[in-house]
Amino acid sequence: MTEQVYLAVDIGGESGRVMAGLWDGAQMRLEESHRFPNEPVEIAGTLRWNVDRLWLEIETGLTKAARTYGQRIISVGVDTWGVDFVLLSKNSELLGQPFHYRDQRTRGMLETAFDRVPRAEIFAETGLQFMELNTLYQLLALQRDTPEVLAAADCLLLIPDYFHWRLSGRRACEFTDATTSQLFHPTNRTWSWGLLKKFGLPAKIFPEVIMPGETFGTLQSSVAERTGLGRVKVIAPGSHDTASAVAAVPAVDARTNWAFLSSGTWSLMGVELPNAQLSPRVLDLNLTNEGGVDGRYLLLKNIMGLWLVQQCKRSFEKRGGEIDYSSLVLLAETAPALRSFVDPNDQCFLNPPDMPTAIREFCRETGQPVPDSDGALVRCALESLALKYQTVLSALEEVTRSRIEVIHIIGGGSRNDLLNQFTADACARKVLAGPVEATALGNLLIQARAAGQFGSMAELRSIVSRSSKLREFEPDPSNARAWQDAQDRFTQLLLRASATS
């Protein structure tokens, strides 16, 4: 067959890209059309996303793709991070640049929310873990600080839905991203109208919800003309990047219990299940239920992830020139092993002025040796992530009452072989790393499936397996005792932190 081409707009916390997927009937081959930075901007002391700049970059990428692939292009779909949103007026004017989830305005908002609606009730209505960055708490901060903006809003669109609207003209929210808001009911599978009423949030601004694989429409004529794409279809992938990434987990053996670990700025570790898990124990463990493809749910934990290393890198570069991630890994390999740990999810690491300082202060305050070199700082971050993964793995096994045999690490972080090996050692499980481009690949394959190229999720994952090169990491038995001792120390660290919080 003549190769068909699908386009994925895939935007993460550091960068975005327009990726072309070339489908030959058996494999999906990826080619990058355009890559661009995604940096927040500071406006009057607040942290915002520059969505106008991102839209210009998207159009640039689509224009490049149109010149390269022409009439072979079938459709386009967008995925991004979750929780953040734009507000539109009745005249479709953007009501301010959208806030960044790391902005300070939601500090303390969890307690404010619990004073109005009990924690257990919010969980029963949404199934989501409690993080101040969730859409719910961002809206409550808006309600408190600038109620006039909320009153002027006619529609709320999460970030990928905003770009789908710019592409197609249709106002709708895609299921997987809607579930990240802590305003979506996990069993009714619609907005939690009761919760919105209790918080006094305007129900009218929440649009219809559509599922992955559904069509937003065709490309608006103005966009089609500017980019040269023509009136191609705009298809909803798993617009929350985690959902598209998990769709591309190459798990082809139905007899093997597996967990996914989407590794990037954030690490999202979990299992794929038919329905949301709403037991008191899931609430106690602060696990979360996020939407997946085909209406499934991803029971997972959000972990701060490689953000710690990214911010260390930024700090090192301010001190003296550029340094790449491979050089940081080499420095970490030569640093002392299993010496000091941090809880990656501690609030002090969300957006500190200087990450190395934050790590050193955490170690000092918890009575641990203070990392004394760049390599020691990076090793502390990576080992702490691996130990956090083991903690989450134990929680997932407890809730699902089944032993997880394989951990699939997907996304950009799967290139970090040192962290992959640490994960295998800490969790005492086999790790399969790849695909690196899981999010874009999942996005593209969901579009191809919507075009009728194949049917089931099992077929999709078989295609991923054929289209990707995986790397295997086995736990090193000679290090088993050292990692178990480290896990005991890490567990005590978490318990002490919980007791003092």
Image (cartoon, rainbow, N blue to C red):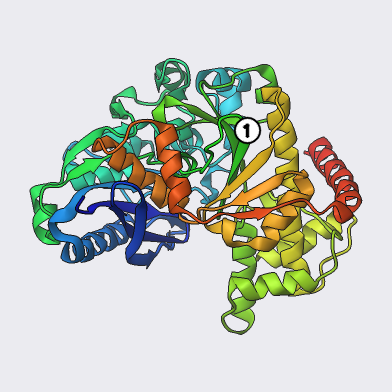
Q: Tell me where residue 460 appears, x and y as whole percent.
A: 40, 39
**Left/right of residue 155 with respect to residue 392 in the rendered view:** left
Q: Residue at x 88, y 43 (%)?
A: 488
Q: Quadrant of residue 95?
A: top left
Which of these two is toward me, 270 or 98?
270
Q: Tell me where residue 307 appears, x and y as whole percent.
A: 60, 58
- Where is 413 relative to 204, above or below? below
- Where is 29 relative to 197, above or below? below
**Left/right of residue 78 with respect to residue 189 in the rendered view:** left
Q: Quadrant of residue 427?
A: top right
**Left/right of residue 248 with respect to residue 258 in the rendered view:** left
Residue 434 visible in the shown view = yes
Which of these two is toward me, 453 or 71?
453
Q: Residue at x 69, y 37 (%)?
A: 405
Which residue bears the numbered disc 1? 256
- The local crowd at label 1, few if under 14, some if 14 to 19, many if 20 or more residues have their Cα within 10 Å, is few
Label 1 is placed on what type of residue?
A: Thr
Q: Tell me where residue 442 appears, x and y as whole percent.
A: 40, 45
